[in-house]
Amino acid sequence: MHLDVLDLRNFYYRSALGRGAQKVIRDELVSWWPNVKGQTVAGFGFAVPLLRPFLADARRVIGLMPGPQGVMPWPAGQPNVSVLCHDTLWPIETGVVDKLVLMHGLETSENPTSLLDECWRVLGPGGKAVFVVPNRAGIWSRSDNTPFGYGRPYSMGQLESQLRKHRFVTERSQSALYQPPSGKRVWRKFAGPLEKVGHHMPIATGGVLIVEVSKQMAAPTRPGLTEAVRRPLKALEGIAKPAPGAVSGRDLP
């Protein structure tokens, strides 16, 4: 079940813990997608805290917010780009999105299979999508102090397997939010160093999993060329073979 948009807004924009979490995940995303000039970027769930860096260069930015969650105008002080939509029926044409971000969308959806089908539909060939979900092995999924304590947490293998079943190709993955889910000042002070140490750990134990996938389309078949190879041209086809014992012109008197 989706969280309420007001609770999500208060966490990410009005709490020190939420602003810190937003920065960690957003910085990771921007390092993966440094250039979106002229592209269409969309986010589903409550992904708008991650989309602000793309407003300046992207051709278009769209914030899709599911009906059960509710919608809020975004970005503040600028023309609104957020829209209320059904989980599995987005007001976007097929194949027009270049970059797609899901946060607080997949793990809270009541129909994740149809949701992933919709992600596939709106992405163009070669398009990229990033999924941010609670990590089953992390402590954030066990705390009610953050939105990542709600919905279905994933392991890295579970998430990648589900995405693979929907024809997505995993490009890279990362765990983040190694800091405790606490707003206490002492933990906020050490949040940066903890993230740096966590990135060098051999296992993904951060609070969230971040996985980038791409939509790879099979090259179109060319039946004309295939048929030509299967049935090569026979230059002498139609010329009768000489019968045994036939008389040639040279043997005539």
Image: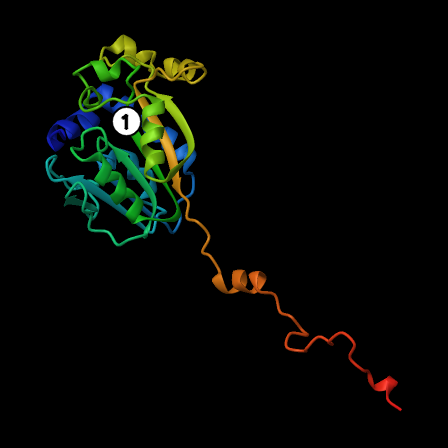
Q: Report the residue that reaches farthest toward the front.
A: 245
Position of 50 relative to 35 (above/below): above
Give the image location of residue 29, x and y in percent.
37, 33
Q: Report the residue that reaches farthest toward the right.
A: 253
Instruction: Give the residue type that dot 1 points to.
Output: Val
Give the image location of residue 191, x and y in percent.
33, 15
Position of 201 relative to 21 (above/below): above
Which residue appears at 30% of the width and 37% of the height?
101
Q: Nearer the viewer, residue 250 or 227?
A: 250
Position of 189 relative to 71 (above/below): above
Which residue appears at 64% of the width and 70% of the height?
234
Question: Where, by quadrant of the figure, is residue 135 drawn?
Answer: top left
| Label 1 Cα crowd, 10 Å radius (few <14 / some 14-19 / many 20+) | many
Q: Report the residue that reaches farthest toward the bottom.
A: 253
Question: Where, by quadrant of the figure, is residue 190 drawn?
Answer: top left
In the picture, the quarter occupied by the C terminus is bottom right
Give the image location of residue 134, x and y in percent.
26, 22
User: How is the protein colored in the picture?
Assistant: rainbow
Question: Where, by quadrant of the figure, is residue 184 drawn?
Answer: top left
In the picture, the quarter occupied by the N terminus is top left
**SS class of the residue under badge 1?**
strand
Position of 127 relative to 160 (above/below): below
Give the image location of residue 171, x and y in percent.
43, 34
Which residue appears at 28% of the width and 8% of the height?
186
119 on left or right of 204: left
- Look at mark 1 in the image and give the residue it sits on: 133
User: How many dots with numbers?
Assistant: 1
Q: Nearer the viewer, residue 207 or 94?
A: 94
Which residue appears at 67% of the width and 73% of the height?
235
